[in-house]
Amino acid sequence: LVKPFALAEVKALADKAVATRALKDEVRLLRRAVGRAVSPGGDRLVGSSHALLDIFKTIGKVAPRNVPVLITGESGTGKELVAHAIHAASPRAEKPFIPVNAAAIPRELLESELFGHERGAFTDAHESRMGLFEAANQGTLFLDEISSLPAAAQATLLTAIEDGVIRRVGSTTSIDINVRLITASLEDLEAMAAAQTFRLDLYHRLNVLKVEIPPLRKRPGDIRPLAGH
């Protein structure tokens, strides 16, 4: 401040100082919380760029809310790490975190893997088996490559989200589930929905909250700490 100054200037500078201090405290706490979120594979989010700090802040905002999250980004940007960080910072942190790559499951086995099956439901179904939704009950299910789901599985997934129930393949009994669904996609789901290759109603159900991860080339400040890690 340079004399003479108005009280409004003092107030404006004080407000700015308080806001800056609060923001620094928030970022420090978020970085500490997310930094502790280690994936089942032993990896974690590493870096200090503004872009990554924005992701930390986004995680801090979406984690407490019990709604679906859609994560977008190129291959290798850390979508599963972000999903695990959201789970670790959520009230479900002590419950299961089940990650699955939908594109890696053969189409004929997809519904069985997700929702389970009863004995005799199909060839080689020699015993009943719970699916990934049941395994993740009370916790978080992370579905990567969600764009690869065939139409039939999309319809079943939509029912599970809307009604909170699933039905094993070959069963007539519904099972109540309480699962937070986090999905990720390399493809533009909105464009796929417009082209009618992905259900529009399912897209809106999945895209309640969105986290976009920029590639490393757009956050070069993270290269050195990531290499060190």
Image (cartoon, grey):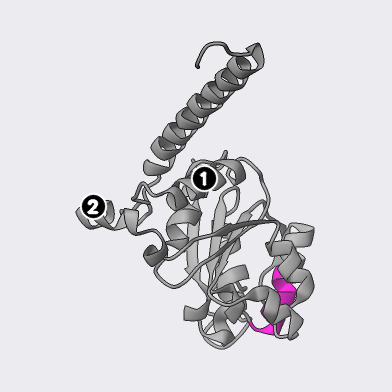
Helix, strand, or loop for circle 1?
Answer: loop
Q: CA distance from mark 1 to mark 2?
A: 28 Å
Q: Is residue 6 left or right of residue 88?
A: right
Q: Considering only order in the chain, which callout, 2 or 1, is on the residue closer to the N terminus?
A: 1
Which residue: 70% across, 57% down? 208
Q: Is residue 50 above or below residue 159?
A: above
Residue 130 can be seen, yes or no? no
- For residue 95, the mark is 1
Q: Kindly identify the amino acid type of the residue bearing the numbered disc 1.
A: Lys
Which residue: 51% across, 31% down? 23
Q: State which quadrant residue 91 falls in.
A: top right
Q: State which quadrant residue 206 falls in.
A: bottom right
Residue 20 can be seen, yes or no? yes
- The percent coordinates of residue 39 (x first, y second) are 38, 53
Q: Which residue is mark 2?
A: 229
In the image, the segment drawn in magenta is 150-157
- The percent coordinates of residue 151 (x first, y second) are 70, 83
Q: Is residue 92 above or below residue 72?
A: above
Estimate how packed mark 1 is, as few (under 14), some (14 to 19) or many (20 or more) residues with alpha carbons within 10 Å.
some
Helix, strand, or loop for circle 2?
Answer: loop
